[in-house]
Image (spheres, helix red, strand yellow):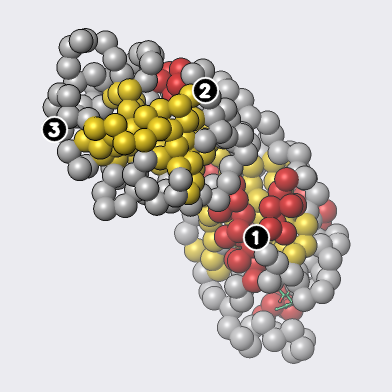
């Protein structure tokens, strides 16, 4: 029995394609209706890249994928005026991380942030060791994260006290915390070191200061030099990415970690020929069956998914 590698399309091919390991029940099974349209090749895992949607319907799967840090990655940040938020968004994009904004229960007004006024709220909080501004909302499933990038603006050389509130709200034992900050001109200084007693059993990495206008490339350079926890093939949360390339561009494929996708990785690099099926998807045939261990009986595909599918006809 053959397995079919299907690439679902709508009007345009989606740029981010997810390979799913379960067998998929075809909604409109058919036979011998595939017209070969183009070839594609899929390569070995490598680093993630910004994906560009393929412009043609004859994708060529390229050669890379990336190892991301073990477990989930969270970018948690507080930003009163948007600068730190920009860096946090770069990190989210670079790391395909979850983003969590630390939102004060009482928002900071311009007057609150007027540091030229000694009695403004921000200054008072920074001068009060016991200040713990309340946070609105909670972080869902903090246990999912092995790495937390923690972002804040520098206030008088230190992290705002709401970062203390955040660190004291969750059990971060064993979590790798990577501080980052923005400022007018000050460096990160002692701000990150002074946070460490609030999560003493976390693995604190060196922090980094950025200007509010730092580019994504600047942030990428920093991330590349970090000593993050290494990828583990046995970790269920591990996500491997492939790069699908075609004459028209590239797309990142984020693989789920299951028997079928792990089996598929052993076939790389590979060249696949895709053809149109019923104007709704692009399909290709693999040279052998993939493992269906623990695969669900059916799967409801979404536009942009890449799925290994059970055969819809008997062997020829
Ligand atoms: C109360 C207060 C204190 C600040 N203290 C410093 C400082 O010590 N050094 C500095 O370079 N910038 C300082 N700044 C400027 C902020 O660090 C800078 O504008 C930062 O990028 C703001 O980030 P945000 O937009 O994410 O809130 C201070 C700002 C405020 C409101």
* First-in-chain label (2 vs 1): 1
When the figure is inspected, residue 315 is found, relative to residue 237, above or below; the finding is above
Q: Nearer the viewer, residue 6 or 151?
A: 6
CB under 8 Å between discs 2 and 1:
no
| Secondary structure type for disc 2 | loop
Contact between marks 3 and 1 (CB within 8 A): the answer is no
Q: Which residue is mark 1?
A: 216
Q: Neighbour class for label 1 at 10 Å: few (<14), some, many (≥20)? A: some
Q: Position of residue 82 (x, y in %)?
A: 60, 73
The answer to which of 96 and 155 lies nearer the viewer is 96
User: Is 156 above or below relative to 19?
Assistant: below
- Going 55% across and 68% down the picture, which residue do you hit? 104
Identify the residue position indicated by label 3 in the image: 28
Q: Is residue 92 visible?
A: yes
Residue that mark 2 sits on: 268
For the residues carrying marks 3 and 1, which lies nearer the camera in this image? 3
| Left or right of 175, for residue 307 | left
Confirm whether residue 163 shows in the render: no
Residue 45, image quadrant: top right
Left or right: 3 with respect to 172? left
């Amino acid at each position: 029995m053959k397995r079919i590698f299907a690439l679902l399309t709508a009007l345009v091919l989606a740029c981010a394609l997810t390979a799913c390991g379960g067998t998929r029940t075809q909604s409109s099974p058919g036979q011998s209706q595939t017209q070969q349209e183009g070839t594609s090749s899929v390569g070995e895992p490598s680093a993630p890249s910004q994906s560009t949607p393929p412009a043609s319907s004859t994708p060529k799967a390229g050669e890379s994928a990336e190892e991301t840090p073990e477990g989930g990655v969270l970018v948690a940040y507080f930003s009163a005026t948007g600068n730190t938020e920009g860096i946090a968004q770069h990190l989210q994009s670079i790391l395909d991380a979850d983003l969590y904004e630390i939102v004060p229960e009482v928002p900071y007004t311009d007057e609150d942030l007027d540091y030229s006024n000694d009695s403004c709220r921000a200054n008072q909080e920074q001068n009060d060791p016991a200040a713990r501004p309340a946070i609105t909302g909670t972080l869902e499933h903090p246990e999912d994260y092995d790495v937390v990038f923690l972002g804040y603006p520098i206030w008088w050389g230190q992290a705002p006290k709401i970062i203390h509130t955040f660190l004291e709200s969750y059990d971060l034992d064993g979590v790798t915390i990577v501080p980052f900050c923005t400022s007018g001109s000050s460096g990160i200084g002692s701000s990150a070191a002074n946070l460490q007693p609030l999560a003493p059993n976390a693995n604190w990495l060196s922090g980094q200061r950025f200007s509010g206008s730092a580019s994504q490339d600047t942030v990428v350079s920093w991330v590349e030099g970090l000593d993050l926890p290494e990828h583990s093939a046995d970790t269920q949360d591990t996500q491997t990415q492939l790069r699908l390339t075609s004459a028209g561009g590239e797309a990142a494929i984020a693989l789920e970690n299951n028997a079928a996708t792990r089996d598929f990785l052993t076939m790389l690099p590979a060249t696949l020929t895709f053809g149109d099926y019923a104007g709704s998807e692009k399909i290709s045939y693999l040279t052998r069956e993939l493992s269906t261990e623990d695969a669900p009986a059916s799967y409801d595909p979404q536009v942009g998914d890449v799925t290994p599918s059970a055969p819809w006809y008997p062997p020829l």
